[in-house]
């Protein structure tokens, strides 16, 4: 029994000495860490590429969709002012003719409908604006995190080599 314990301690049971076993373990550990580092570099590059695509889509939305919302809202506001002027002219004419009364009522109904649509567009524009701000914050946060990872990687490489 004592011989078996002594054989295990000296490394004879495994057929290799303890120093050779440690060297083998250390070599294996270095290879695993190196391989892991390479896969992390690939993942980091993939994250950077995807992040760049997100930034491009954000810029497109910010430069195309938001101005379209604003133009639509401005056009509706201009049309409401036009209807207001037409209604004011109708009040000045104040004709008793039945055609004027129908036209005046129709203008008021159209103005109300246009105002309702403008309110919906403005609400959607406000919600979209909030979403854009949140996306911009997320993009800035991801930019800062990617920059930190880049600096950490450079620091690690400088310490290693």
Image: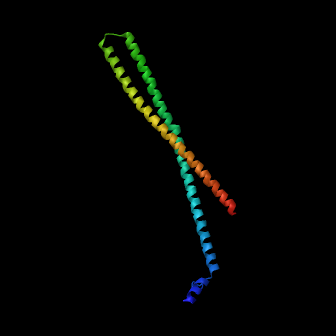
How is the structure coloured here?
Answer: rainbow
Task: Classify residue 110 by image quadrant.
Answer: top left
Q: Residue furthest left?
A: 98
Residue 150: percent from the left, percent from the top? 62, 54
Query: Where residue 153 appears, x then y in whole percent?
Result: 63, 57
Q: Position of residue 22 (x, y in %)?
A: 62, 76
> In the image, what residue occupies the spot 60% across and 83% down?
9
Q: Is residue 131 above or below residue 20?
A: above
Is 21 left, or right, of 66 in this rendering? right
Residue 140 drawn above or below residue 40: above
Query: Is 75 on the left-hand or right-hand side of 143?
Result: left
The quarter in which the N terminus is drawn is bottom right
Q: At 34% across and 10% down in the image, what residue appears?
A: 95
Decide which of 120, 32 is in the foreground and name it. Answer: 32
Q: Residue furthest front?
A: 2
Q: Is residue 118 above or below residue 35?
A: above
Quarter of the picture holding the C terminus: bottom right
In front here: 2 or 144? 2
């Amino acid at each position: 029994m004592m011989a078996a314990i002594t054989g295990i301690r000296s490394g004879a049971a495994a057929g290799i000495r303890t120093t050779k076993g440690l060297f083998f373990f250390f070599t294996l550990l270095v290879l695993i860490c190196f391989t892991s580092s390479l896969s992390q570099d690939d993942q980091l590059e993939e994250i950077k590429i995807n992040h760049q695509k997100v930034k491009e889509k954000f810029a497109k939305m910010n430069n195309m969709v938001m101005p379209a919302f604003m133009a639509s809202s401005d056009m509706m506001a201009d049309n409401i002012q036009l209807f207001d002027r037409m209604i004011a002219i109708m009040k000045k004419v104040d004709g008793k003719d039945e055609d004027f009364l129908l036209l005046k009522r129709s203008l008021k109904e159209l103005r109300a409908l246009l105002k309702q649509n403008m309110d919906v567009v403005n609400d959607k524009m406000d919600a979209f604006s909030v979403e854009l701000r949140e996306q911009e914050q997320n993009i800035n946060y991801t930019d800062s995190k990617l920059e930190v990872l880049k600096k950490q990687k450079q620091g690690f490489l400088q310490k290693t080599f």
